[in-house]
Amino acid sequence: MMINCTECGKAYSDQAKACIHCGARNPASTGGGCLKAVIGLVVMVVLFAIFVVAIRMYTFDPKEASEQEMIMACRDALNDTANGIETRQTLREACDSWEQKFREKYGHGPY
Ligand SMILES: [Zn+2]
């Protein structure tokens, strides 16, 4: 079947990927388009995988490290005798609960 080119208006076969007169792409042709869609999909999946890995790397290790630092700082303040006995008692409870949460989350202590 012959179709008319959308660009130059001349007739060419609908089996052709592009107009034989001006080279404009045949909008009805699926040749190459399907492969392009598959490649596009693969690229998207790969990009998504990289994105997920990057997010995991960003959210897991640095977070564990910063929580570790927070507990260490808490312990330091706890050992600082300049703090009053009531402050240190409150701190001890806070430190213990943070440490407990840390152990539950990461399966090991913060030290
Ligand atoms: Zn044409």
Image (cartoon, rainbow, N blue to C red):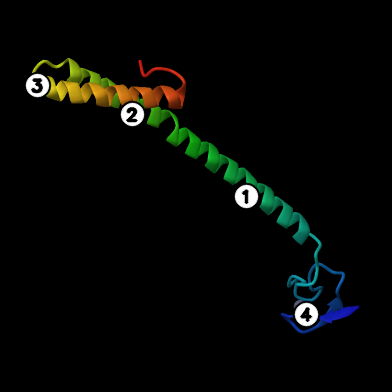
Label 4 to label 3: alpha-carbon separation: 87 Å
Cβ of mark 4 under 8 Å from ligand 1: the answer is yes
Q: Is disc 4 in contact with disc 2, using a CB cutoff of under 8 Å? A: no
Label 4 to label 2: alpha-carbon separation: 63 Å
Q: Residue at x 43, y 28 (%)?
A: 61
Can residue 38 be seen here?
yes
Name which residue type carries label 4: Cys
Q: Is disc 4 in contact with disc 3, using a CB cutoff of under 8 Å? A: no
Label 3 to label 2: alpha-carbon separation: 26 Å
When the figure is inspected, residue 10 is found, relative to residue 33, above or below; the finding is: below
Q: Nearer the viewer, mark 1 or mark 4?
A: 1
Looking at this view, is 105 or 62 the one in front? 105
Q: Is disc 3 in contact with disc 1, using a CB cutoff of under 8 Å? A: no
**Residue behind mark 1:** 44
Q: Classify mark 2: residues with Cα within 10 Å, few (<14), some (14-19) or many (20+).
A: few
Coordinates of residue 16 in the picture (x, y in percent)? 84, 69
Q: Quadrant of ligand 1?
A: bottom right
Can residue 73 be seen here?
no
**Residue behind mark 3:** 84
Q: Secondary structure at mark 2?
A: helix
Q: Is residue 84 left or right of residue 49?
A: left
**Residue behind mark 2:** 66
Label 1 to label 2: alpha-carbon separation: 32 Å
Q: Which mark is residue 16?
A: none
**Residue behind mark 4:** 5
Q: Classify mark 4: residues with Cα within 10 Å, few (<14), some (14-19) or many (20+).
A: many
Q: Nearer the viewer, mark 4 or mark 3?
A: 3
Q: Residue at x 81, y 62 (%)?
A: 31
Q: Residue at x 62, y 50 (%)?
A: 44
Cβ of mark 2 under 8 Å from ligand 1: the answer is no
Coordinates of residue 111 in the picture (x, y in percent)? 35, 15
